[in-house]
Image (tube, rainbow, N blue to C red):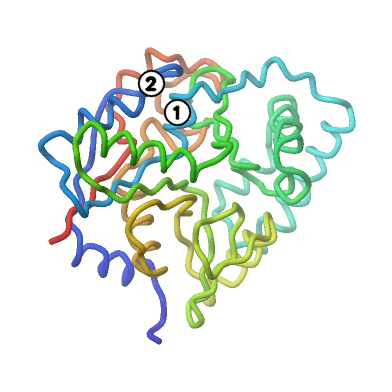
Amino acid sequence: MRRITSGRLIQAASSRYKPIRLVMDLWLPGMDASSKLIEALKGKANNGDILVVSEKALSVSKGLVVDEASIKPSILSMVITLLLMRIVWGYLLGPLCRLKPYTLEWLRAYPLREGSRHKQLAAKLGGLLEVLKPSSEAGVDASNLPGSLVALPLFNPLREAEELRSKIKKCLGINVTVMISDSDRLYIHRSSGFALTSRRSALKRSLYLGFLAYIIGRTFRGKFAPFATPLAVVGEQLDSFMLLGLTELADRLRGSGAGRTVFEMAERFEVGLEEVTWRMLSSIKHCPAVLFKPR
């Protein structure tokens, strides 16, 4: 087996499928995402195509958002956040995982009040293995959302993929493969092809390890390659490498909207961390899905 790299798997996916970015307005809570996607697919999609959709965008459209300002962090939560993020990750695990200098600076100045609320929510949703991650804990995502809102992970990604595929079949009369993915990294061993995941994945040859997957994958970067995570796939049976190549390519093509983190968003709009608004976010075009067509 050739050494696995993201470049090789993306190249393999690109040689077999032509990607089409589905760019549209920001999806808001309560919006009918299925109708938006079906409208975007008209005249573009055919039998055998593959549709890769962002979990985050779907979650927001379904109203799976929480205002973390409503969470009152306990003293214990604040102490744990201080020790875990500013000290353990800022000075021990961060350098071990070879995090970039600006990321280490961010960790060492991690906001305690907002961070404690975030950790408390993650603990409730995902438990200890998720809380110990430095970011994207339990799939909770604050990027491209205003104020102190965060998006929760889909409760059942497989069911969501099945329902979306069924609606596309009913409205457009075509069978497409539907994949739901998340930008959270999984780490695949470059020689064996076995993956360590920080979230539950649709990848068959994988092992969920929570924050340990992040530490192992980042620390031994020569042994492991990072990829976006496929959460659910319904339709055509894809081999693991094609699945990973399509997921990673779709993640790169979708981009990060207003920013990958709340810090990037705040910097982009030149406001405070919790001062980003829906209006600001809506001023930017977003790409919640990518359609892949066989060449």
Label 2 crowd (10 A; few <14 / some 14-19 / many >=20): many
Q: Residue at x 47, y 46 (%)?
A: 182
Q: Secondary structure at mark 2?
A: helix
Are the residues at dot 1 and dot 2 in contact (C-beta closer than 8 Å)? yes
Q: Is residue 239 left or right of residue 263?
A: left
Residue of label 2: 281
Rendering coords of residue 4 (x, y %): 41, 76
Q: Secondary structure at mark 1?
A: loop
Residue of label 1: 144
Which quadrant is the C terminus positioned in?
A: bottom left
> Which residue is at the front of the view, 273 or 292?
292
Rendering coords of residue 19 (x, y %): 20, 51
Rendering coords of residue 278 (x, y %): 42, 15
- Say above or below: 159 vs 248: above
Instruction: Measure the C-alpha gap from mark 1 to mark 2.
Output: 7 Å
Residue 115 occupies which quadrant of the picture? top right
> Which residue is at the front of the view, 4 or 246?
246
Which badge, 1 or 2, is on the more N-terminal residue?
1
Label 1 crowd (10 A; few <14 / some 14-19 / many >=20): many
Amino acid type of the residue that numbered disc 1 sits on in the rendered structure: Asn
Amino acid type of the residue that numbered disc 2 sits on in the rendered structure: Leu
Q: Is residue 292 left or right of residue 104?
A: left
